[in-house]
Image: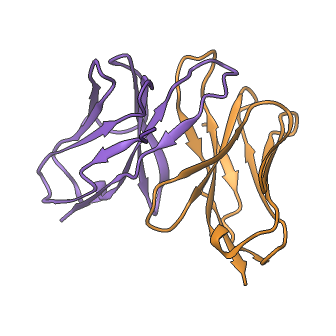
Chain colours: A purple, B orange
Amino acid sequence: KAGVTQTPRYLIKTRGQQVTLSCSPISGHRSVSWYQQTPGQGLQFLFEYFSETQRNKGNFPGRFSGRQFSNSRSEMNVSTLELGDSALYLCASSGGTGKNSGNTIYFGEGSWLTVV
Amino acid sequence: QKEVEQNSGPLSVPEGAIASLNCTYSDRGSQSFFWYRQYSGKSPELIMFIYSNGDKEDGRFTAQLNKASQYVSLLIRDSQPSDSATYLCAVNENYGGATNKLIFGTGTLLAVQP
C-alpha cells in the first residue's frame, strides 16, 4: 500500500516568489492536512481538507493557501515568499474522523523549502 | 491556547534499558493521542496512537494514557541505538469527528548508548 507522496522533495526559491507543493494521500484517505516544521516553532498546523473543503485552518497569514481535488490529492501554495518561510512542509493523510475511531494520521516525507 | 508539553531532553539510556517518555496536555476534552518518531532530517513516523485510558502495547512500545491527570507516556523496552531519535507527542484536536488537527509537543530527544 503506497504511503503519502509529496513533491517536490527539495526546492530553493527566491524571496517574493511563490511556490506550490503537492501531496497525494494514502489510497482511500479523504483527509489531508498540511504542517510546517521549523527549528524554532516546531510542528505547526496549517490547514486540513476533507472532500475538497477546508475544514480547519491554523494561524498562518493569507499567503498560505491550499486546495484539494476530487481524487483527494492536495496542493498548498505560498505566495510572496519570505525568508522565514524556509521550512519542512509536511502533508498528513487520514482515513477516519470518528471520535473514537483511532483514526491514524500518517505523514509524507515532506518538502524542504529554502527561501533565499 | 491548547498546549502539549514534553521535556526536550536529551534523555540518555543504556542499550537494553527501558526508555520512558512523558507528555502532558492542557485540553481536558482531548480524545486521541499520538506518538511519532522523527529521525534527524526525516519526517515523523507514526509509532502508536491511543484514545482509551490505560495501556496499549505494540511490540517493544507501550503507550499509557491517563485522562484524569492529562498525561500520556511512551515506554520503549529493550532500547536499541536505532531508537535514538526525537519522539513527538501529539494530541488530535478532533471533537466529534469534525476535524483532524494535531497539536504537537516540542519533542524529546532520546539517545540510546551502546
Q: Residue B87's spot in the image, x, y percent?
A: 64, 58
Residue lying at the far bottom of the rendered structure: B114
**Residue toward you, A77 or B82:** B82
Residue A99 position by quadrant: top right
Q: In this view, does A82 lie above or below A78?
A: below
Q: Evaluate whether residue A39 shows in this view.
A: yes
Q: Residue B105's spot in the image, x, y percent?
A: 62, 51
**Residue toward you, A26 or A44:** A26
Q: In this view, does A102 lie above or below B11?
A: above
Q: Residue B14's spot in the image, x, y percent?
A: 79, 79
**Residue toward you, B77 or A59:** B77
Q: How many labels does the image show?
A: 0
Q: In this view, does B42 lie above or below B74?
A: below
Q: Residue A50's spot in the image, x, y percent?
A: 41, 20
The residue drawn where x is 87% and y is 39% is: B69
Would residue B85 appear left or right of A28 to someone viewing this image?
right
Q: Evaluate whether residue B2 shows in this view.
A: no
Residue A60 position by quadrant: top left
Residue lying at the far front of the rendered structure: A1
The residue drawn where x is 31% and y is 38% is: A23
The residue drawn where x is 53% and y is 32% is: B101
Would residue B68 appear left or right of B63 to someone viewing this image?
right
Q: Quadrant of the C terminus of chain A?
A: bottom left
The residue drawn where x is 39% and y is 34% is: A25
